[in-house]
Image (cartoon, helix red, strand yellow):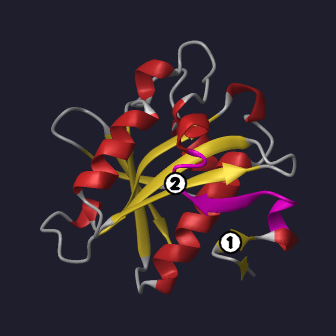
Amino acid sequence: MLWRVRGVTHYPETMGDMRLEELSATNIVAANTLTLKPGQEQYVAPVSHSIAEAYVNPATAWPRVVIDDDDVVVGFIMGNFDPDSPHDEFRGCIWRMNVAADAQGKGVGRFAVTALADEARSRGFDRLTVMFEPGELGPEAFFTAVGFEPIGETQFGETIAALTL
């Protein structure tokens, strides 16, 4: 169950003291400087690319940061909600997700995906998709662990996976 205080979404029962906030002028620098583990950079576009996409597509983009109980930005997730997209995999999807190297394995990614899934449900979506490049250091194991199942492949060889909501 989630609750909101001054526009901030909290999930205290399942995710500890992490919270989700809209990307803003006060947290954008921290989001843009998240450091990944070595080798992960090739699988994730920089947050600055997401910021540009959110600016270009403000009606469908959903950029958020994950903040821990020490008020530190430890993750970033950007969803896209476009029920009219001609491509089913782009209707309700995760566009980008980054978790700070030292915060990986601590529930930050799961928290971010759960929050995005809750938002998708609240908007009437019954499925959430994600696309990722396969590889040893890539995010496939994570997305599979949180319930995504491969459903196809893009023309560029990326895996398309879906989570039924």
Give the residue pinned by disc 2.
23
Q: Nearer the viewer, residue 64 or 116?
A: 64
Above or below, 138 relative to 59: above
Q: Is residue 25 magenta?
A: yes
Q: Residue furthest top?
A: 38
Residue 122 in the figure: left or right of residue 46: right
Give the residue pinned by disc 1.
9
Choose top left, top right, bottom left or bottom right for residue 58.
bottom left
Q: Nearer the viewer, residue 67 or 150?
A: 67
Q: Is residue 117 magenta?
A: no
Above or below, 164 relative to 1: above
Residue 151 in the figure: left or right of residue 119: left
Q: Amino acid at mark 2?
A: Leu
Above or below, 151 relative to 50: below
Choose top left, top right, bottom left or bottom right for residue 42.
top left
Pick the quarter of the image with the N terminus.
Answer: bottom right
